[in-house]
Image (cartoon, rainbow, N blue to C red):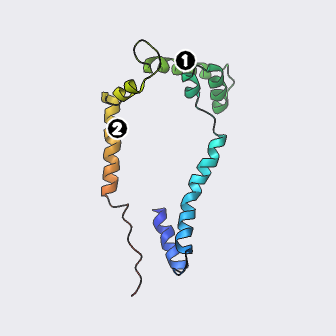
């Protein structure tokens, strides 16, 4: 919705003779992406990511930093134990690493299959609403 208002304001205030009329909206759209790109460098890795790689010290340090609690706090210990249990449950039978074939088979399990279907259905319905339709700028001829 904000994009429509920006396009309306640019159409009403900037002359269509030059290239400025399409550069301004494009630059404004690039701004959030640029902020996200540079913000990634200050974002720590996920504690779960470190836990899956068996780096529990780093997972504990990051989790305590995120929660603003000391590493030996009961809440941190409980959350790390829950992460351990979830890592063990998520592994294929017999332990080991997750293969691509095993992960592909997980996509078609009942709970995950339903989530994927809902997401795809929502994307299709959103496109069918016509919100992506761009009307050409109307100029008096």
Front residue of 137 and 66: 137
Q: Nearer the viewer, mark 2 or mark 1?
A: 2
Front residue of 96 and 111: 96
Location of residue 108 with respect to 36 vertically, above or below: above
The residue that mark 2 highlights is 116
The answer to which quarter of the image holds residue 93 is top left
Location of residue 130 with respect to 105 vertically, above or below: below
For residue 88, side relative to residue 42 (left or right): left
- Circle 1: is it few (<14), some (14-19), or many (20+) Cα within 10 Å? few
The residue that mark 1 highlights is 81
Please tell me whether mark 1 sits on a helix, a strand or a loop.
Answer: helix
Front residue of 72 and 4: 4
Q: Position of residue 52 (x, y in %)?
A: 54, 23
For marks 2 and 1, give the CA distance.
29 Å
Quadrant location of the C terminus in the rendered image: bottom left
Q: Residue at x 61, y 33 (%)?
A: 45
């Amino acid at each position: 919705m904000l994009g429509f208002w920006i396009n309306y304001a640019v159409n009403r205030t900037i002359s269509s003779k030059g290239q400025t009329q399409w550069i301004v909206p494009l630059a404004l759209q690039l701004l959030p992406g640029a902020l996200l790109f540079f913000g990634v460098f200050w974002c720590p890795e996920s504690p779960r990511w470190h836990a899956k790689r068996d780096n529990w010290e780093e997972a504990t340090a990051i989790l305590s930093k995120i929660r603003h609690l000391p590493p030996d706090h009961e809440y941190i210990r409980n959350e790390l134990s829950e992460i351990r249990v979830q890592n063990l449950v998520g592994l294929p039978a017999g332990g080991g690493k997750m293969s691509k074939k095993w992960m592909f088979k997980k996509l078609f399990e009942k709970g995950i299959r339903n989530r994927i279907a809902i997401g795809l259905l929502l994307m299709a319905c959103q496109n069918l609403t016509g919100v992506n339709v761009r009307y050409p700028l109307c100029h008096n001829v």
